[in-house]
Every structure is written in C-alpha cells, then in structure tokens.
Amino acid sequence: MIETDIGVTKKQNGSDEALTDEICAYFDEGNQPAVFFVQIDCVDAAGHGYGSDSEEYYSAIHEADGYVGRIYDAAVRNGLMEDGLFIVTADHGHKIEGGHGRFSMRESLTTIAAVGKTVVPGGTLDRLTRDRDIAAITLFALGVEKPAVMSARLPGNLFENTAGEARSFVKDPLDAVISAFMWIVTLCTPQR
Ligand SMILES: [Zn+2]
C-alpha cells in the first residue's frame, strides 16, 4: 500500500539491527524525509511466539528500545527533530500465552509515545485515543487538511495550545460498540 511513484525510498531487511544501521546511514547521508516509517519486528515476533510474560518478550522490548534510541539519536544529530515529530507505537498488545488475534484489552491496548517541539512534555493522551489517530496526528503535524470522512481524530493533551477533536459517533458508530464489547470480553477473561 505504498505509492512508490511519489519519491518514496523503500528498504527491507530481515534483521532489525541491519535495518537500523541502514536508517541511521540514510539520515547521516543528509536525507530529510517529510514522512518516515519503520517497523521493528522483534517485539511482535517474541510476543506471538512466547507470550507477553516471557524472558524473550522483555528482551525483545529491550532490544527494540535500543534500535529506536539509535534511530532517534540519528534524527537528532541530523537536525530532523528541530521541526520533527517522533512517534513510537505498537500495532497491538499481546496475551500471556502468546498467539494472535482476539479482542481482549491485553491484545488491543498499546502504548503511543510522542516527542517533538510542540508536544506537551510529560503529557498524557486522552482516553479516547486510538492507534489509528496517528493518521490524524501526522496530517495535523504536516499541516495537511484531514479528509472529511476520516474517523481518526486529533487527541487532546498532545500538542501545546491545541484542543483535541471530539469523537464522532456518526463517522464511526461501530467504534463505541466494539469498545464496549472489548471491555465485556476482558471482564469475562481471567487475567493475571
Ligand atoms: Zn502481531
């Protein structure tokens, strides 16, 4: 789903470490991408294979933290953070027993962390924030008007002097239903 004819540089590497090396070199060569995305795979692989309470999972988080730190440092030393927004998130959470693809809060809750010139230091995103809102956040940061049909919203408490957008039931009636369903499933699922 990547439009390659609009000046996209695309790289793939089976090793997160080698990919991180390539990214740091790409920044150090003076490249200044308007939008940059990387997926580091080791945490996801460990979560699926060993579950979220395993040594492998925690060690993968530690490993990924190192890669993210290196990429962030490369962005800083090349001036990209002077006017840049750096967001770290995960596509989903994990169950203690591993595996994939249900509705429990353990699987659907993720962390979203952001840093940038106008990001509120130490702020906490409002409770309505969803992973998909990163699309709205990114468009806002780039100064691009959000398409009217987009259900992603700008969360409150993210940018200084910027109010969050209200959640739209009209644009996304399923969201409220699914959220309620997920809470019920979670309440009915034994958690440690
Ligand atoms: Zn996964």
Image (spheres, rainbow, N blue to C red):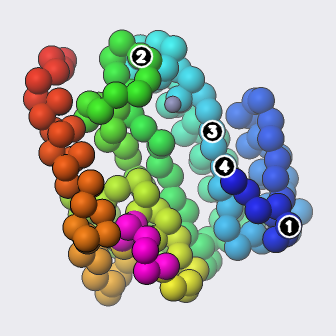
The answer to whether residue 129 is visible is: yes
> Splitting the image into 4 quarters, where does residue 4 fall?
bottom right
- Look at the numbered discs 4 and 1 and tell me whether their residues touch, using CB distance below 8 Å: no
Q: Earlier in the sequence, mark 2 or mark 1?
A: 1
Query: Which portion, as a residue range, is magenta?
Result: 147-153
- Look at the numbered discs 4 and 2 and tell me whether their residues touch, using CB distance below 8 Å: no
Q: Gap in Å between the C-alphas at discs 4 and 1? A: 19 Å
Magenta stretch contains residue 149: yes
Q: Which residue is tagged 4?
A: 38
Q: Which residue is tagged 1?
A: 5
Asked if disc 4 is less than 8 Å from ligand 1, the answer is no
Q: Position of residue 142 (x, y in %)?
A: 58, 80
Determine the main secondary structure of the stretch shown in magenta: loop
Q: Earlier in the sequence, mark 4 or mark 2?
A: 4
Q: Gap in Å between the C-alphas at discs 4 and 3? A: 6 Å
Query: Residue flagged by tag 4: what amino acid is it?
Result: Val
| Left or right of residue 168, residue 22 in this image | right
- Look at the numbered discs 1 and 3 and tell me whether their residues touch, using CB distance below 8 Å: no
Query: Residue flagged by tag 3: what amino acid is it?
Result: Ile
Instruction: Residue 165: give its label.
Output: none
Q: Earlier in the sequence, mark 2 or mark 3?
A: 3
State whether residue 35 is above or below residue 21: below
Q: Which residue is tagged 2?
A: 98
- Look at the numbered discs 4 and 3 and tell me whether their residues touch, using CB distance below 8 Å: yes
Instruction: Residue 40: give its label.
Output: 3
